[in-house]
Image (cartoon, rainbow, N blue to C red):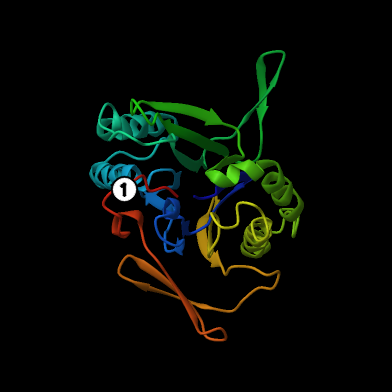
Amino acid sequence: MTVVAAFNWLDEIIIVADSRVSWNGKRPPEDVLIKLHIFNDARKAIVIGFAGDLQVIKTVMVQLNFKFEKYSHRFVLSILKDKVRRWIEEVTLGKLRPGIKRDIKFILCGMERSCHPEVKQDGLTIGHMPWPQMHFYEYTINCVSGKVQLISSPGPIVIGSGAALKAEIIEAFQRSIKFGFNLSALRPARALIVTDTISLIFKDSPQSPEVGGPFHYICLTPDRLQQNYVWPSDGNFKNFAITKSGTKTILYNSELNKTFTLNPVWEVSFLKNGNLEV
C-alpha cells in the first residue's frame, strides 16, 4: 500500500510519497520503492507518482519511460496530460490480467512558468495572478477494463491507502507550509518539514503497517526542482547520507547503522502469482 500526496502553494508544488511495499501479506513489508519519477524537457519538469497493482504500474512506467524518451516536443501540460492518458491505455485497455481487486492510480504534477492563473470578474478576465499556472492530474485505471479516467484537479491530491487520512494530511500540510512564508531561501527546509509532518501521521495510525519507510519529496518552483528524503520519523530529524548506485538510491544512517536501498518500480522483484500492491 502507499501514500502519494501533491500540494500547491502559491509558486511551488510539493509532492510526497512513502517507500513501502506491503506485498498483500505474501511476505513482510519492505521499504524499497521509489514512487515519484521525474520527466524533463529543456524547459520544465513534471512528476509522476502512483498507487496500486505493482505489475500494472511497472508495465505503465516502462511505457511512459519509452514514450518520454521519444517525445521531441516541448512539454505543454494541457496537451501532455491527454497524451499520457493515451500512452497508459495503450498497455492497459483490455489487457489487464484477471483478479486485480482495486483501480490503479497515477498523478501528474507540473507548472507552466510563463502562464499565470486568470483573475475573472463577471465572466471577464481582468488580470492575472503573480504565480505560475499549476497543473494537477489524476489518472484512474479501471481494474477490469483497463480504461483510464483523467481528472484535472486544483489540488491537493492524495492517492493510495493513505488517502483514508486525507483530511489529516491536508491539515498537516496547511499547518507546516507556513514555515518561512514568502522566503524562497527556506523552501528546502519547508518541504522537509511538510514531509516529516506527514510521515508522523502514519507512525501510529491504522495504516502504519502499509505506509512507511523513508519519505521522498520533490519541490517544484519556477526556477528549480529539489528533491530529498526524510528518514522514518520519530519527531527528530535524522542525519544520513544519500548515494546513487545506477538507478538505485541508497540511504545510510551511520548512527543507527541502517541502510535503505530504494529502487524504481521496473527493478523491484515480484512474486510470480497474486496481486501485488503499493
Instruction: Tell me the residue at 67%/63% (across/down).
Output: 186
Q: Is residue 43 above or below residue 76?
A: below
Secondary structure under tag 1 reads helix
In this view, 242 is above or below 182: below
Q: Is residue 10 visible?
A: no
Percent x, y for residue 33?
42, 59
Residue 21 position within the rendered picture, expressed as x and y whole percent measured from the top left: 44, 56
The percent position of residue 86, horizontal first and vertical second, equals 31, 29
Can you say whether 107 is above or below 197 in the image? above
Left or right of 142? Residue 235 is right
Q: What residue is rendered at 59% in x and 42% in y?
A: 163
Residue at the farthest front position: 26
Give the residue type that dot 1 points to.
Answer: Lys
Q: Is residue 266 visible?
A: yes
Q: Is residue 89 left or right of residue 187?
A: left
Count of numbered tags: 1
> In x, y percent, where is residue 36?
45, 53
Residue under circle 1?
A: 58
255 displayed left or right of 237:
left
Relative vertical location of residue 78 with respect to residue 221 in this rendering, above or below: above
Residue closest to the eye, 146 or 251? 146
Q: Residue at x 46, y 55 (%)?
A: 22
Crowding around mark 1 (Cα neighbors within 10 Å: few <14, some 14 to 19, many 20+) is: some
